[in-house]
Amino acid sequence: RWNWRNGHATRITEETRRIIMNIDGLGPGCEAHVAATRDRVAELLTRHCGAAVKTGLLTPASPSLRFE
């Protein structure tokens, strides 16, 4: 349920060329689970959609990132 197909702002279609996908986690030790989920989604997007993927991980110690 990361992107709702009926929502105009978040819908992903065959014509979509760029997306940002947030994967949230809460609680102690969630960073490893979030990173594993992120990596799995990235792998699926690459394999099934031919996507070029950039990933990052926001944490309390690293609260920002920049994609160039």
Image (tube, rainbow, N blue to C red):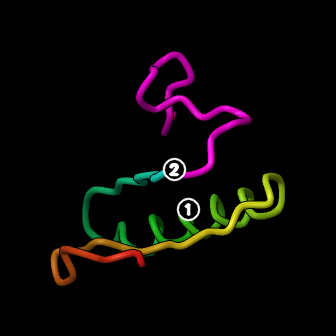
Q: Helix or strand or loop: what does disc 2 sit on? A: loop
Q: CA distance from mark 1 to mark 2?
A: 17 Å
Question: Which residue is found at the position 66% from the left and 32% from the top?
Answer: 13
Residue situated in front as seen by the camera: 63 or 31? 63
Give the residues in magenta.
1-18
**Magenta span dominant secondary structure:** loop
Q: Nearer the viewer, mark 1 or mark 2?
A: 2
Residue 33 x, y percent position in the rendering: 47, 67
Query: Furthest-bottom residue in view?
Result: 61
Residue 36 highlighted magenta (yes or no)? no
Question: In the drawing, does residue 57 fall left or right of residue 27?
Answer: right
Question: In the drawing, does residue 39 fall left or right of residue 19?
Answer: right
Residue 1 x, y percent position in the rendering: 51, 33
Question: In the drawing, does residue 51 fall left or right of residue 5?
Answer: right
At label 2, the amino acid type is Ile
Per the image, the residue denoted by label 2 is 19
In the rendered structure, are the residues bearing label 1 and label 2 in contact, judged by CB atoms less than 8 Å apart? no
Per the image, the residue denoted by label 1 is 37
Query: Furthest-top residue in view?
Result: 6
How busy is the neighbourhood of tag 2: few (under 14 within 10 Å), some, or many (20 plus)? Answer: few
Tag of residue 10? none
